[in-house]
Every structure is written in C-alpha cells, then in structure tokens.
Image: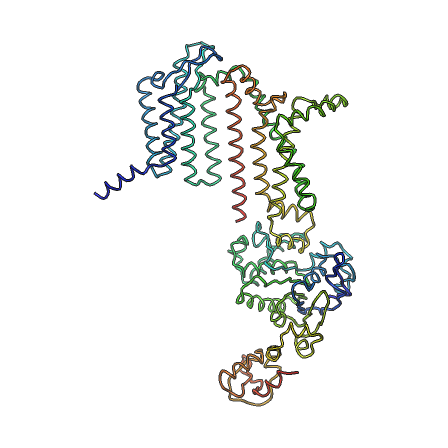
Amino acid sequence: MITVEQLSKRYGETTVVDEVSFTVERGAITVIVGTSGSGKSTLLRMINRLVEPSGGRVLIDGRDTRSEPAYRLRRRIGYVIQGHGLFPHRTVAENIATVPRLLGWDARRIEARVRELLTVFSLDPATQADALPHQLSGGQQQRVGVARALAAEPLVLLMDEPFGALDPIIRAKAQDDLLDIQRRFGMTVVLVTHDMDEAFRLGSKVAVMSGGKLLQYDRPAVLLTRPADPFVSRMTGLADRALRLLSLITAGEAALPGASDGPAVAPTASLRDVLSELLWCKAQSARVVEPDGTVRGMLTVAAILARGAP
Amino acid sequence: MAGAGARRRALVRVDPLGAVLVAAGAAALIFMPFVLLKANRIVPGDPRELAQVLPAWGALGCSVILALAGAAALWSEDARIRLVLALAAVVTVALCAAAAGDALTPPGNQVVRVAPGGAFWVLIVCLGLLATDAATRMRPGPAMRVGFLALSLAVVGFALAHGVFDHLSVMREYAVNAARFGREARRHLALAFGSLAAAALVGLPLGVLCHRVPRLRPGVLGTLNVIQTIPAIALFGILMAPLGALAAAVPLADRLGIRGIGAAPAVVALFLYSLLPIVANTVAGLKRVSRGAVEAAHGMGMTGWQVLTGVELVLALPVILTGVRVVLVQNIGMVTVAALIGGGGLGAFVFQGIGQTAIDLVLLGAIPIVTLAFSAALVLDALVEVLNRVKG
C-alpha cells in the first residue's frame, strides 16, 4: 500500500505539485493522468525520491520513504520510463540483472531470474539474452525495460509514460501484457500517462491532475458518471462518455437470467463490444457463454443501453 | 571490337590522384638527385642519379618496379594491386638508397656521408600516399590497421637492426649518438605521456564538474581556449619567471628539478595545452549519453558514483578517447619544442642539427617524432572505432 500525504513540490515561486494526498491499495493499478505540466511525472518521481518533496510524505506499507537512503529505497521499487532507458552498452541479460547485482544476489539466482523474466516477456533466452538493446525491436526493448524493473521482485512498480514511444498496435499488446504481468506477480503499480484511453483500460483507479492539484481520484466509472470538476469531464470526453462507460462493464457483470438465440459473447467482453456485435448482426439479444460452453445468461440491446447512463 | 573500345576508354580514364603522384615522382626522378655524396656531415652534397649509383641490373629492376607501381596508380581499379605495388616500390626505393650508401662509402671511411636526395624523399612521399590511399579504399578494420602498422614497424626495425641502412647519413648520425638517442627518445615519451596522464587526472574530473555544473562551463572552457592560443615558445617564456622564482624560494622544488628551464616548464605547458581537448571532450561525451539511460540508472538505485563510472563515463569513453588522441599527437609534436628550453627529448637532435646545419641530425630527431605521432593517432583511432562498434 502506498500512502501519499499532502505531497508538494515547489521550485522557487512555482508550485509543481500542490498538497496531493491519495492511497494506492496493495496489488492495484493506479493511473495518474493529466496534461503536460500538470505535475503528474513529478508526483510519480517523488514516490521513489528521484525528486525530493518540498512538503508532505510518502509511506510504503506504513514506512516513510525517507527512513533510508534514496538509492536503497529505489532498489525495492521498479521504475520504467518512456523510451525504455536501457543501457546501450550492456546486453539484454545484463540490463535485466542490474538491480539484482546491485543487491548482491548470487550469480545462479540472477541467471535463473533473468531466464524466467525473458520467458515471461516472450523473449528467447537462447538468442536474445546476449543481444544488445539496439538489436531488438521497439516492442521488445520496451518489454526488456519492464522486465528489468521487475527483476528484483519489487512490491511497487512505477511507470512514467511507459508505452508513449510505441505505435498503437504494439502499445495495445504492451497494455494487455502489463495487465497479465500484474495479475501474475501481484505488484502495486502506479502509472503516469496523458492518454485517457490508456488510463481507463489499465487503471482500477484513476487520478486526474491539473496545475499540480489532484482533481479527482476514483474508479473510472465514477469519473464518468460523477466528475468532480469540469476539467475531469473534459479529460474523459463528453461526446463518447456513454460508450466509455459501456466499455468499463463486462458482459458477465451485466448478464440477465434467461435464454437468447442471438450471437454468443464471452463474459469478459465489454458491453461496448457486445453492443457493436449486436448492431453488426442486426440482433436484439446475445447469449453470454463461458469458454467451456456454460451459458451465463443473456443481454438485450435495451439492457445494454440502460447501462450507458448514470 | 567492343572490348577493345572499352579498353581504350579505360586507358584514357586515369586515376586523378595517381596521375598527380606519378607526375611528381617522375619529375623528381628526372630533375632531382637520388642521393647526395658529401665529403663530411655539413658540406653541401654532390648529386648522384639512381643510374649512377646502382649496377645496371639493379637500376633496371628498380625502374621496372617503379613503372609497374606507376601504371597501377594510373589505371588499376583493384585496390589490392595498387597497395602491393606501391609497398613493393617503397621497399625497392629504400633498398636502392641503402645500396647506394654501401656503394659510395669507401670501406672504413667514417667521414663521408651518403644522404638521400630530393628524388628519394619525393618518391617515398608519393609512394606512401599511394599506399595509404589504396589501403583506405580497402576499408580495413581497426585490428587490420593496427596489425599493418605493427608489421611495418617490425620490418623497418628488423632492417635497421641488421644494419641495412647503416651507410646512410641518418644512421651515421645515429651511430655517433646511439647512447643519447635512447635516452632522448625515452625522455620524449615520458614528457608526452606524463603530461597526458597529468592532464587526464585533472581534466576528467574537471570535465565531469563542468558537465554537472553548466554555470562553470563557459569560464573553464574559455580559459583553456585562451591558453591554447598562446604559442608554445611564448608559454615556456611565461612559465620561466614563476617557476624560476619558485625554485629560488623553495630549495626542495629546486632539488626536485622544478626550475625556470628544463623539463618543469615543458611539462606544465604541455599539461595546460592538454586540458582543453580532454575537458571539452569529456563534457561533449557526457552530454551525448542517453538521458533515458542515466535516469533509469538513478531510478533503479545506482549510487551517483555507480551511475558516473558504470554508465556515463563508459558511454562517453569513445568521445573522451578522441580527446586523448588529439592530446597525445599534439604532445608528441610539441615536446620537440621543449628541447629549446633544456627539456630534452628528440627535439634536442632537431635543434642541435639546425644549429650545426647538419640536416642528417635534424632527421634523426624528426623521423622518429613523425613515426611516433602517426602510430599514436592510428592506434587510438582504431581503439575509438572498436569502442563505437561495441555500442552499435
């Protein structure tokens, strides 16, 4: 659990982050979203003390981050930046082994961990472990960057616009991978982005920042239905907010009892996708079916439309 | 018919560099003496043509090889042929000069000097340029270049050790000065490398500081720039007064050899000249390091020292080494002038030779200096290339 208490950063007269407080649950993904200059990156960098706060404090699992030297704190926290930041002169395996080496792990443990991470991130330990970063594709470099951040099994992972340099298709894949990895390792993630779609897709909670202030911090659906500030509704977008809302609800959650002879949809599909499928098939209802064939229920167009507004 | 036409066009299309060098070499052979026969080391020489100093078969063989090298320089597109023939011609010309020395020196005579003449020097320079050009066209890798240098030095060293050139004037000067030559050469290297080491020891931290504190940069680099513009002799002069005063005031300094003249002002001046390339290149190299890599290094919990030594300096190394290359080549050349203020080094032969109008003695100093500077440049260039390649 990360507790941020009245955290501020001032450079001379300018206040970049203004008394921000929030709590990130253990094992959750929190996304900080804002325009450039909103202070979101500074806020993130104060959690691992790459920027020292001017006021307030950060507690990780109840322990003040200032109770140990910054470099020791950072070795317990994964950190991923835009454009991966890999060391160009070190191989993929050496890059991943950076923090375990700093922590003095023995060679066999490091090798086993590197091998495990390469496999998890769909890289080939036989051929790609000894490659230099520039020999990999952009998507692979980004995956190595995340693998490196997770090498020493940190409980917290900080990500500063990690997918900003990727093209849309690779970015979508990287986002899915992150959700998988988070489920697998269970670390607490704080991610900074300026992309609201990314925030809604990844965040169990989203923090909206503007001008150094935290405007709202809540579940994505709440940001849509009860925006605390006109800026929040501008960020989330007014034109397609109904569809955004539908995209946050799964067919499994919304399924009604009953039967339907319409198209089959998976319980993990979002209502937005189900609606799109129904429109395409000119059908009025869909069956919600588990992958193993069990029928979970049904959804009608009317039922879906009813969920598209607060 | 088409083949004959193409061949005729190929004959007309000559290599421009080859044409210039062949013309220069041919003109030198015709209008300049190949060797000079001097009654003693300081009188002007008596010119001798190539044909006059060699037996007929020798002169013919030499002419054939020169003609082949010239033809390859003009018309061959194959860099390997150009290189091999140019090198063969260099060796031939050198051996001809050695043979001329042997032939013209009366047995047992230590006073007569056989000096290479204008034709010899022009030919060596032209053929050397041809060989360099051909080697460059082959784009050799760094290891190949260093290997080639080592082989060339080994061949020359072997020939010198076996007395092949002993009857040529420069080697006569060497024979007279053998003991001093070794001492001055060691001193030359000590002065050049010593001032480089001192400059690296001070320049690297100063460069890192200038990179970390941008406010310092204009002041430090500006000052070092001004120092660079002071001519070496003037700087020696400027240093004479304070170092002399120091020696007078502090007996320990005097006992350590820190005086107004001698090695001390030379080392200090070379050190000051060396600072700019090292500091400027350290700053430039550090600036070039990817900010992402540095940020990630801090973010993962490397200490400041670990980031500097493990990431920043390693990534900046090729640029820093380029600065070291500049300094080393510059120092090897500039140490020569240190001889003027009693600093010693190979420059001692150069200035002594100038004083005595003994050109052979000048060459005894100058040729090793040029060879040293050239070798240092080549080795460090190769090193920089290897480091850059590793990083991709």
Q: How is the image coloured?
A: rainbow
Vertical side of B73 occupied by B169: above or below: above
Vertical side of A60 occupied by B205: above or below: above
Q: Which residue appears farthest toward the left when viewing the image?
A: B1
Between residues A158 and B113, which one lies in front from this camera angle?
A: B113
- Residue depicted at x 72% and y 57%: A51
Q: Position of residue A83 (x, y in %)?
A: 59, 58
Q: Where is residue A164 in the image (x, y as percent from the top left)?
A: 59, 63
Q: Position of residue B29 (x, y in %)?
A: 36, 23
Vertical side of B113 occupied by A135: above or below: below
- Residue depicted at x 57% and y 78%: A269
- In the rendered image, which quarter is residue B194 located in? top right
Marker count (numbered): 0
Q: Where is residue B261 in the image (x, y as percent from the top left)?
A: 67, 21
Quadrant housing the N terminus of chain B: top left
Between residues B366 and A258, which one lies in front from this camera angle?
A: B366
Vertical side of A175 occupied by B247: above or below: above
